[in-house]
Amino acid sequence: MKSLFIIAVITFSTTMGLAQQGKVSIEQDDRIIDLLDIYKSSNQEYEYYRIQVGFGSFDKAQRIKESVEIDFPDLFSKIDFDSPTYRVRLGRFKTKLQAERMFNEVRVKYPDAMLLKPKKST
């Protein structure tokens, strides 16, 4: 029993004596920042499916937008000017499936809503 105790003490002291402590530093290539900028700009140019919930004068569009922000606070909403009226558009959906699912929910509250397809870039 004594020898078992001595072996345990030696093993414990050896383990504690060999434990390492260190500092980790990460060196990042500067080109990663450039790649992130390219990624961000490509996402800005991406055309999204949108849902148009209403249109009219600027005052009417503002009222619609305020109502939409209350009803769907998690979705991006924006007033776009498309001559001669202001249009309230909701969401930025990359896939048609996502857009159609939300469109079905939006139509319950806004029956005149329309699903807008992305413009094809040439």
Image: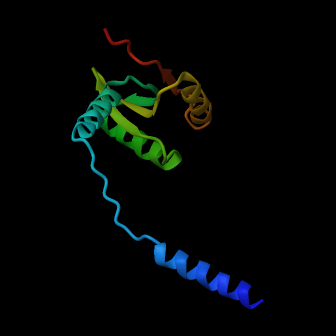
Residue 88 or residue 26, whichever sits in front? 26
94 lies above or below 59: above
Residue drawn at x 44%, y 30% as measured from the top left: 54
Residue drawn at x 59%, y 82% as measured from the top left: 10
117 lies above or below 7: above
Left or right? Give the position of 11 relative to 84: right
Left or right? Give the position of 78 relative to 68: left
> Furthest residue to the right?
1
Residue drawn at x 73%, y 91% as measured from the top left: 2
Residue 102 or residue 26, whichever sits in front? 26
Residue 36 or residue 48, whichever sits in front? 36
Q: Position of residue 11 (x, y in %)?
A: 60, 78
Q: Position of residue 120 (x, y in %)?
A: 38, 12
Where does the N terminus fall, quadrant-wise? bottom right
Q: Position of residue 23 (x, y in %)?
A: 34, 65
Residue drawn at x 52%, y 46% as measured from the top left: 71
Where does the C terminus fall, quadrant-wise? top left
Q: To which quarter of the image does residue 52 belong?
A: top left
> Furthest residue to the top?
122
85 lies above or below 37: above
